[in-house]
Image (spheres, rainbow, N blue to C red):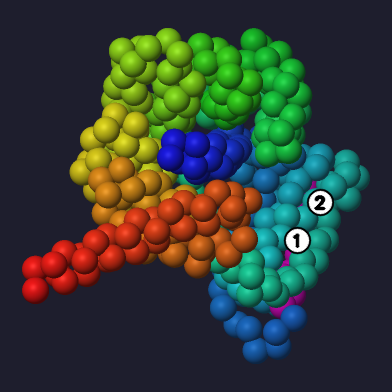
Amino acid sequence: MRRLWRYGIELALTFLIPVVVFAAQEKLESGDHRVRGQVLSPISNFFDRFEVQLFHESNQPLGQVTVGTQEPFTFSGLDGGTYYVVAEVPGFKKVRQRVDVNGTAKETPVMISLEVKPAAETEKAVDLSGEDEASVNVSDLMPRPPHFADEVVAANEDVENGDFDGARRRLEPIVREDPDFYEARKTLGTAYQKLRLYREAEMEFKAARDLRPNSAAPLIALGGLYLQEAQSSESRGAAVARGILNQALGSLLDAVQLNPHAAFGYYLLGVTYYESSLYEDAEENLIRSMEIEPRLSPARLALANVYVRIEDWPQALLQIGNYFSANPDPPDRGQILALRARIEGILASEKTSEKSATSLHH
């Protein structure tokens, strides 16, 4: 059973650390230039009002205005340089349009055309980080070279594409030069974890936790790291694995205390309790994770394993069915179908035994 269970963990951990680059709040020196523009909608009767933001190329936010379509907006007091105008309008694709302000023109025009978002794109992605975007630290406000943020984004893409060593090579020099760069620390920790460099990953996640103590994300990352390490340490003995699982529990309990809506934190708690043979606690936390985020389908597979362990076969079948409803063709389909067939065989055998007992009684 554990092999099936572990796949769910590894699948979820792939998306554990999304990269969100938080911009510095430092203001640029005021200049005499301005950006002036309009937002155009392809829908003629669209009159909602929305926010337009201006960012420096270093991701520093410089201001925002509330406008409607066809209504002009202006950002003044700018130096020459590269800026980005950002508009996020419900029902439309996010627009991030580059604007180059040269040193001679006082006014730079910009025209933003909205594009209707396809229905498949309107659903918000499942948050697996536990990150609270309102949680910042003084280190987030420090000015840093613009290419640092670009390297973190590129490293995150490396992680998603399975190039963990590439991500490590990008981020190690940045962390040495800028040890207070939260996103670099957290993403580097993920790369180390994927490379099974557990102590190095632990150091980076702890550094991220210290940089942003009010965020649950580094604690969830630490919990996932300890859980993976415990599952990989069976050859070192049950006592070692149990000690590492206790570390996972400590981090994850702290995480959900900080952020009671962190669905992935409850999911990993459920897995950790399962590995600790605390099945009632595992069931409770996995159900809680799905109450917060019903699309967290690996939790259903995890819950099926809990019911298998306690031999609640009907509930195990129910959760496997729910998992297939959300994932009609998962990569582990054959393995799960085999498990379902074994459970159905057990139930059929029990039903036959009951009929035989009833016949003998009469």
Residue 19 within the magenta-colored segment of the rendering: no
Q: Is mark 1 on a helix, strand or loop?
A: strand
> Is residue 189 in view from this perspective?
yes
Q: Residues within 10 Å of mark 2 (few under 14, many from 20)?
A: some
- Give the percent coordinates (x, y) of residue 340: 45, 57
Q: Which residue is drawn at 88% across and 44% down?
A: 102
Q: Is the magenta stretch mostly helix, strand or loop?
A: strand
The residue furthest bottom is 45
- Quadrant of residue 166 in the image? top right
- Quadrant of residue 35 in the image? bottom right
Residue highlighted by disc 1: 36
Residue 34 within the magenta-colored segment of the rendering: yes
- Give the percent coordinates (x, y) of residue 222: 43, 25
Q: How many numbered marks, from 0 up?
A: 2
- Give the percent coordinates (x, y) of residue 32: 76, 45
Q: What stretch is highlighted in magenta?
A: 33-41
> Is residue 294 in view from this perspective?
no
Q: Is residue 217 left or right of residue 359?
A: right
Answer above or below: position of 57 versus 293: above
Q: Distance between the residues labelled 2 and 1?
A: 10 Å
Which one is in front, 90 or 7? 7
Q: Give amino acid for label 2.
A: Val
Answer above or below: position of 187 versus 355: above
**Which image quarter is the N terminus in?**
top left
- Looking at the rendered image, the disc whose residue lies closer to the viewer, 2 or 1, is 2
Which one is in front, 95 or 72? 95
Q: Give amino acid for label 1.
A: Arg
The residue furthest right is 104
Q: Residue at x 46, y 58 (%)?
A: 341
Question: Which one is earlier in the sequence, the residue at label 2 or at label 1?
Answer: 1
Residue highlighted by disc 2: 99
Q: Is residue 3 left or right of residue 59?
A: left
